Amino acid sequence: MRFILRLFCLSLTFSFFGGGFAMGQDEGEGTYEPLPQAVKQFYSKDDFYFLDKTGKRTTLELYQGKIVVQFMTFGADSVANILRKQGLKPGSWERITANFGASALKRTLYSSQGIFIVSLPPFYDGLKLVNSLLLMSEVADASPVFRVNGELVYPAGILVNEKFSSIPEKNNLHGKLTEQGYYPYWADVSYKGEIRPPGVSVRLNYYSRMQKISTNPLRLSRLVAQDVLALWAVPDFIPLKQPIEVSVSLSRPSGTMNDRFEAVYRIKYNPKKVVLDKGVLKSFEPMSLKPKAMAESFFKPDPPRFEESAGNITVKISFKMYEPGSFELSPLVVRYNFSGAEKDTLPEVLNSPAMGVKIAGLVPRDSEGRPQAADIFGWKKMGRVPPEIPPMPKAEDYPPTDARFYAKGIQTKYPALGSMLMFSSYFIFAVLASFGMFFLGRMGLRRMLLRQGSRAAEFARIGTARSAKRYVREILRAPDGKTGHELLEECPDAQKECLEELILLLDNSSGTERLSDDDIAKVRKLAGKLKRGMKWK
């Protein structure tokens, strides 16, 4: 009996420590191994829960009537062909704009307009359809839809509150998530190049799912939440319906000059989720709606009229236009913040949809653009006007105060000397132009070489020892975090002397302060020599 009990405890221990993330919360660093992917099982019913910020298990309610799909290409024909193969009828899908990070961070990190909501018939198995779509190369991502707090949402990424005491521990957690296909939105070297805004903790990060073969956000958030390097991790649930929408309508699509048009902008928002900046909206300038291709004197708007109710604002503007052609009204800009956002958070900006208007001249025309009004008088023949021949140019005499007076005198009295001076002037101009082209080409080549490497551009802009070390690692094709000793061991023998001199120069300087001009020149010279040596490796 004891032997069986020990064998059971030993197997339980191996299964506990063999997971992808360590399950403890002590000071030790967790171990990580990639989790095996189940064939054709990206989502399962066992994934329908997550751990909230307090570690409490929260069960999710699956909504069978809809799924969310993101395609590699957004063409209407390609999307229709893919969904028709799954037995879906046209009109059962619609395209939306998704704001990532807004539900958790109270600010939009980035938006995507390539998200499609697919409505399913009652007999469809939505979970099976999601797993089937994820196996298709034309599909970038797919997800089931859940009902959370009475709202339809889908998981897109994960929000992690990291717990680390050193840079290696931080990079360790980033490496675990990167291997699963999730990339941090804010990092020392972010794939989006974003800067962490004020008010966001340095331990808080958003991880976007960039590979559909990776672990789904629900499953990964639970694993990260139990890792020793994370305080908590929760999925980012994107609502299918945006908390604020702007629609626009026009009283007529076309008209003639001096006709009165009325544009109606309807703003519908959820007061519990967003705070609308009504002061800026009610004080906007009506001339801001003027088409960009039209002069100000040809656009005559009236003062706007506002109608407000709970969760709705209607803006009505009447205007006249005095220029024929097809134009597009400039969008109405709506600014708002999410409820619960910090006071110093920059407002979100939402533009109204585009609205076109066509203005015809005062003369009525048919559908093909031909005028329907006839001339009062008939055509008159005009006499032939002979062309005017300009007179011959006359020799002009220059006054003695003009330099051309002496140039003309030399050319008249001494033709050989004048020809020699003219040739000399052409030669001097050609030499100066050649020198100018040489230096311009040299400067352009230098700028092109600087733009080819992000690290070179960073060092040229900042000039610190830290940026120089990143540039050296880029030349050696070495990942971040390697020490100078490790770089010397992997460097070819022919370049070790140059690399050793470069590392010695950078180690003697502070990492955050800008190097002196002499040190920058030495670093550039040694880095260029090292880059030329590594070019053929």
Image: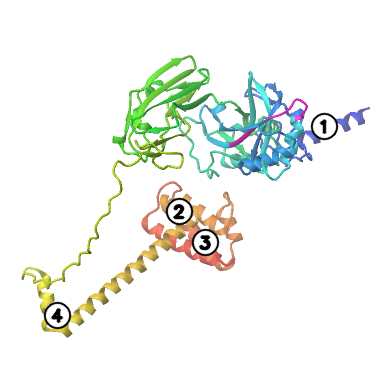
Residue 419 placed where, x, y %? 20, 81
Q: Secondary structure at mark 2?
A: helix
Q: Earlier in the sequence, mark 3 or mark 2?
A: 2
Q: Are marks 3 and 1 in contact (CB under 8 Å)?
A: no
Q: Which residues are magenta?
A: 114-125
Instruction: State the residue lying farthest toward the top.
Output: 310
SS for tag 3?
helix
Q: Which disc, if any, is residue 457?
A: 2
Question: Which of disc 4 and disc 1 is earlier in sequence?
Answer: 1
Q: Position of residue 352 (x, y in %)?
A: 46, 30
Q: Nearer the viewer, residue 92 or 229?
A: 92
Residue 149 occupies which quadrant of the picture? top right
Spot the residue most to the front. 378
Above or below, comparing residue 236 to residue 340 in the picture: below
Q: Is residue 107 above or below residue 439?
A: above
Q: Is residue 315 left or right of residue 157?
A: left
Question: Which residue corresponds to mark 4?
Answer: 411
Eye-nearest disc, 3 or 4: 4
Amino acid type indicated by mark 1: Leu
Q: Residue at x 54, y 24 (%)?
A: 243
Measure the alpha-carbon separation of dots 1 and 2.
53 Å
Which disc is residue 500 wearing?
A: 3
